Amino acid sequence: MVPRALLKCRFAAIGLIVLSTPIHAADYAGPLFDTHLHYNEEAWNCQERSVGPPQASSAPAGGSALHEVKSVGASCSGPHSPADVLARMQRNGVQAIVANSRPNDGTRALAALEQTRQAGVTVVPFIRLYRNRADYDNWFRDESIYEMVQAEFARGVSGDQAGPYKGIGEFHLYDSANAKEANGPVAKKLMQFAAQHQLAVLAHVDDAAIDLLMAHAPEARLIWAHTGIGGPPVARVDELLARYPQLMGELSYRPGLTCEGGRSTPGRPKASEPLRGAANDTQGASVGGHISAPSGARCCSNIPAAS
């Protein structure tokens, strides 16, 4: 199982540090906390949209810690069953995940399966705003999204790792500079809902949206997904982190951090300048092999452990 101290680190279980010389992910052999994992429907079901989420089959495990799984109501399974996903996590040392999926069925399935805990993986469930692909570009003007989040939060996750959701997101905002999206009523209500219930918010946005979202709920805990992916200078990122103590960064799937040969991009943080709350991600670690997880990163300490 994941050491309890690991889970009590608020998305900073493993710091992402960009080094000035090339290294490989294999250089770090310790446990990983993947803070940005989508288990979307196309991964577990070849028919979008199916009747239900993946379920554990009644077949015996045959000595393995993982059962085979199938999708309820589907005539075929997708390329990555829970058994396949958990086996990949075990091979790569992933012991905890922030799961946020389209739809939320995928997250609930991973949390519910006994095999997930048997694989040594703890699920920290987030409520994603997307029921389908159309919601990516429309959630901020759709009141039913807010209603769905409320219902999902009241429901929680059941099964082996039953308990409450810990956050909201990931969600995307593509036109935040003119305030049409981040300043809308749905975004405002979601930020205030998150603050009220002490839920973290995982937002894939630009730097302008950070200010707009935090204005709705200054006490909210906001995680800037793929921090700075839109290209703001490091000084702007530093400014936002200083302005909002509750703001954290994560560098998953983040291009532009290194140049050819693995050297740090000029003006980007170096090993001595860890990003507050940054956390490792198996997706990011597999791209380019230039992301490491030494012990120098700051660790925030008040996210509740997964139930």
Image (cartoon, grey):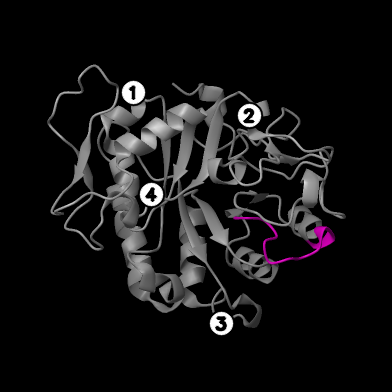
Q: CA distance from mark 4 to mark 1?
A: 19 Å
Mark 3 residue crowding within 10 angstroms, few (<14) / some (14–19) / many (20+): some
Query: Quick one: SS at disc 4?
Result: loop
Q: Position of residue 190 (x, y in %)?
A: 46, 64
Q: What type is the residue that disc 4 sits on?
A: Tyr
Any mark on residue 36, and which?
none
Residue 157 appears in the rendering? no
Q: What type is the residue that disc 1 sits on?
A: Gln
What residue did someone put label 1 on? 118
What residue did someone put label 4 on? 39
What residue did someone put label 2 on? 26
The label nearer to you, 3 versus 1, is: 1
Q: Residue at x 63, y 59 (%)?
A: 218
Going from N to C along the chain, the mark reached first, 4 or 3, is 4
Seen from the viewer's position, the closer of residues 280 and 175 is 280
Q: CA distance from mark 3 to mark 1?
A: 45 Å
Locate the C terminus and report the quarter of the image it occupies.
Answer: top left
Magenta extent: 225-236
